[in-house]
Amino acid sequence: MLLVLTEEHREHLSMLPQVEPSVVGEFGRIALEFLRRGTSPKIYEGAARKLGVSVEAVQQGVEGLMFLLMESSKHTISEVDFMDSVLILGFGEELNQVLLQLYQDNQVQIRRILSQLIPSQPAFHQLEWRLDVQLASRSLRQRLVPTVTMRLMLSENEEGQRSTRVLQTDPSTLLHLISTLEAALAAVKTSHSRRILRNIK
Amino acid sequence: MELSESVQKGLQSLGDQTVLDRCSFPVVVDACFRSLLFSRGDPAVLDLPELKHLDKILLKQIHAAATTFILEAVKHNADKSTISFSLEELTFNTERVETFYTTLKFHFWATLILFVMSSSIGRGPAHIKDVSWRLQYQMKNGQLDKVNEPFYLISLMLFYCTSAFARLQDLVGKLKDAAKSVEKASQV
């Protein structure tokens, strides 16, 4: 699929051919850093002074580049589609290659950064378990009750924040849990699932 | 079985033939069992016509002692000889011991329920009763197209957690280890 770039976007990117391709590479590096850590106006000012252009032009150029890379990574467009989308901007061959290189080198990373923006649910991280036997309680003596005590660790979000829960179950429920979850695992291998996984790409 | 002084005193009154005659004794014993097992704290459990002639305070003391004794017997899973021994020490005659034990056996199933209820008293971590799952296929979301990943949504009683395929296998593997260990321990 081709990217559709708005008039405004094209205007922002129009300053890129005015500078050296190495500078465009530098802008790309800055853009990625900003995607990772957020923008910093001081860098715009420094770059504007070095290149002899306005701060606004530098800002628009970098942000335009950020948006281009983000949209391309979001849709994982192919090389051919990327080049076709960029051709519309009317840049030179060298500049197009620089942009393509930027995209290819950083696509995976950008997708990872974007995935951090998705509201995430707690996910399984680790399970520790222990077999306990209750021998007595205040209300009852001479007991023999096996229980499996577990510590379930979940990762709450991408930053790795963990939550821990202590749970207990008896052996028969444990076997039931195992058989139910094995049925869940088997569900992804059915022909229905395989057909969907194969055809929706 | 160790019994406190007030329980011993109450039981001695229960066994004393001058306090409770042959007709009232089984009625009192039955009332004590019923108040533990069936009546759910009904204050009228001792309001029986056969017991009208008895001193109310003494009756309450006897009732409290007998119910405590029954709970202690359940707690220690006492057999007939233990119960007989304890009651004979408190001047119960053979006939009364027999009546008490017969009533215990008569309410056997209810006593078993009492046993189970006692076993649920106590603190512990949340208990897993069941697990339900859902397999989903994520195609795209607000930030990314072409995600194309199957994932599981697992619900364990009170909370939810998602799990990628490989991680679910990990979880199941660990649960299986736990189960194997339980089996080995049970064979010892």
Image (cartoon, coloured by chain):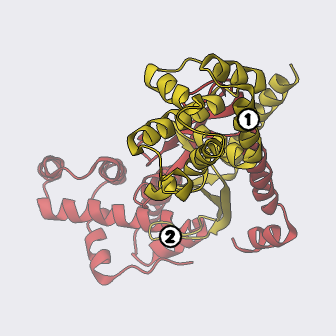
Residue under label 1, please give it: B101
**Label 1's element?**
helix
* Label whose residue precedes the other's in the sequence (1 or 2): 1
Kindly identify the residue that appears in the image at 63 percent across and 25 percent down.
A141
**Label 2's element?**
loop
Kindly identify the residue that appears in the image at 71 percent across and 74 percent down.
A200
Badge 1: chain ID: B
User: Quadrant of the image for the N terminus of chain A?
Assistant: bottom right
Kindly identify the residue that appears in the image at 40 percent across and 69 percent down.
A91
Residue B141's label in the rendered image is 2
Residue B25's spot in the image, x, y percent?
62, 41
Badge 2: chain ID: B
- Colour representing chain A: red
Q: Which chain is yellow?
A: B
Q: Is residue B42 above or below residue A165?
A: below
Q: Indicate left or right for B180 with A134 as reference.
A: right
Q: Indicate left or right for B86 with B140 as reference.
A: right
Question: As shown in the figure, which amino acid type bears the numbered disc 1?
Answer: Tyr
- Whether tag 1 and tag 2 are in contact, CB under 8 A, the answer is no
Q: Residues within 10 Å of mark 1 (few under 14, many from 20)?
A: some
Residue A1's label in the rendered image is none
Q: Residues within 10 Å of mark 2 (few under 14, many from 20)?
A: few
